Image: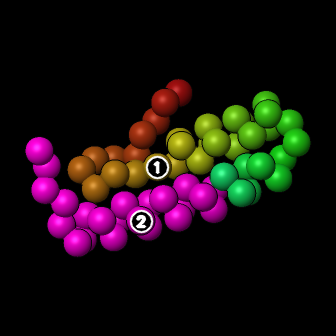
Amino acid sequence: MSVFTAATIMQSEEFKNELKEIAEILNQFKSEAVQLKVLDMLAGQLTFPSGPPINRK
């Protein structure tokens, strides 16, 4: 069983809020194909503390 610290919970809440904001923006596009393209472009810009940006192409 994992132990969640206050910092982990705060990061989780921040992450959920960011995902909600992204979802609101994506949902403004009527075309699912456009939504997926924008999401793919955003995912290509992600960076993680442990490594370089993800390049999926």
Q: CA distance from mark 2 to mark 1?
A: 18 Å
Extreme right residue here?
30
Q: Secondary structure at mark 1?
A: loop
Badge 2 amino acid: Glu
* Near-viewer residue (46 or 33): 33
Q: Residue at position x 28%, y 47% from top?
A: 51
Q: Is residue 40 magenta?
A: no
Q: Is residue 16 magenta?
A: yes
45 and 28: which is toward the camera: 28
> Which residue matches tag 1?
46
Magenta span: chief secondary structure: helix
Label tally: 2
Q: Position of residue 16 (x, y in %)?
A: 48, 59
Q: How is the image coloured?
A: rainbow
In this rendering, the answer to whether 40 lies above or below 3 is above
Mark 2 vs 1, N-terminal side: 2
Q: Position of residue 19 (x, y in %)?
A: 55, 55
Q: Residues within 10 Å of mark 1 (few under 14, many from 20)?
A: few
Along the horizontal axis of the image, is 3 left or right of 6?
left
What residue is pinned by disc 2? 13
**Residue type of the residue flagged with mark 1:** Leu
Placement of 4 over or under 46, stated as above or below:
below
> x, y percentage for residue 57?
53, 27
Residue 47 horizontal/vertical position (percent): 40, 51
Q: Residue at x 53, y 42 (%)?
A: 44
Between tags 2 and 1, which lies in front? Answer: 2
Give the SS element for disc 2. Answer: helix
Q: Where are the magenta residues, as a range?
A: 1-22
User: Split into 4 quadrants, where in the image is the N terminus?
Assistant: top left
